[in-house]
Image (tube, rainbow, N blue to C red):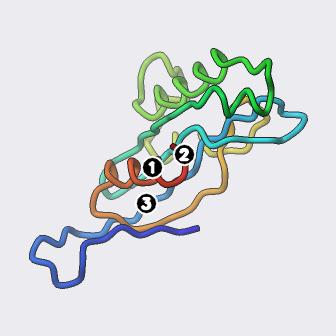
């Protein structure tokens, strides 16, 4: 799925359209079963020097997949992703690279309680607003 969020053509307030990549963050309470729920979104926009993740956990939805889900583990994993996006010292080596390398590291396939979906692209004039729009449409 690709997405675009652009002002109307010819608009006096048209901002430049910037290319971006995004992926959904998905909780996989039981990796052996492969069932997943969207719990966030990660957006990277090179032209805006932007990399950020937003998260939203619905404990009831997660417990529907696994009544014994480790909510603290899911929350900790999501906070680690946010720290990597921000380049926070707590993220260690993973948070030390360029925004592109961090996005690549975060979207690499792994078998963990939080995984990423496929990477999609789009155009936007405002990466922050686009991330919020993706959260409202695909996660919340």
**Mark 2 neighbour density, 10 Å: few (under 14) some (14–19) many (20 or more):** many
Placement of 18 over or under 127, stated as above or below: below
Q: Residue at x 12, y 70 (%)?
A: 13
Label located before the other in sequence (3 or 1): 3
Q: Secondary structure at mark 2?
A: loop
Q: Nearer the viewer, residue 96 or 7?
A: 7
The residue to which callout 1 is attached is 136
Q: Residue at x 51, y 64 (%)?
A: 121
The residue to which callout 3 is attached is 20
Q: Nearer the viewer, residue 53 or 46?
A: 53
**Looking at the image, do the residues carrying marks 2 and 1 touch, with CB atoms under 8 Å apart?**
yes
Q: Residue furthest right?
A: 32
**Looking at the image, do the residues carrying marks 3 and 1 touch, with CB atoms under 8 Å apart?**
no
Which mark's residue is nearer the viewer, 2 or 3? 2
The x, y position of residue 35, in whole percent, is 80, 41
Q: Residue 139 — which label?
A: 2
> What whole-number distance in Å separates the C-alpha atoms at marks 3 and 1?
18 Å
> What whole-number distance in Å separates the C-alpha atoms at marks 2 and 3?
18 Å
Residue 118 is left or right of residue 30, and the answer is left
Q: Secondary structure at mark 3?
A: strand
Q: Residue at x 43, y 18 (%)?
A: 89
The x, y position of residue 57, in whole percent, is 56, 30
Residue 113, quarter of the rendered image: top right
């Amino acid at each position: 799925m690709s997405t675009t969020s652009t002002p109307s053509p010819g608009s006096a307030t048209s901002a430049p359209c910037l290319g971006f990549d995004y992926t959904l963050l998905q909780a996989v309470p039981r990796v052996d079963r492969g069932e997943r729920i969207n719990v966030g979104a990660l957006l990277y926009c090179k032209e805006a020097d932007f990399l950020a993740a937003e998260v939203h956990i619905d404990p009831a939805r997660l417990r529907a997949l696994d009544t014994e889900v480790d909510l603290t583990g899911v929350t900790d994993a999501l906070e680690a992703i946010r720290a990597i996006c921000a380049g926070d010292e707590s993220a260690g080596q993973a948070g030390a690279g360029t925004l592109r390398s961090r996005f690549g590291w975060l979207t690499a396939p792994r078998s963990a309680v939080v995984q990423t979906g496929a990477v999609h692209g789009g155009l936007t004039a405002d990466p922050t607003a686009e991330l919020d729009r993706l959260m409202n449409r695909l996660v919340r």
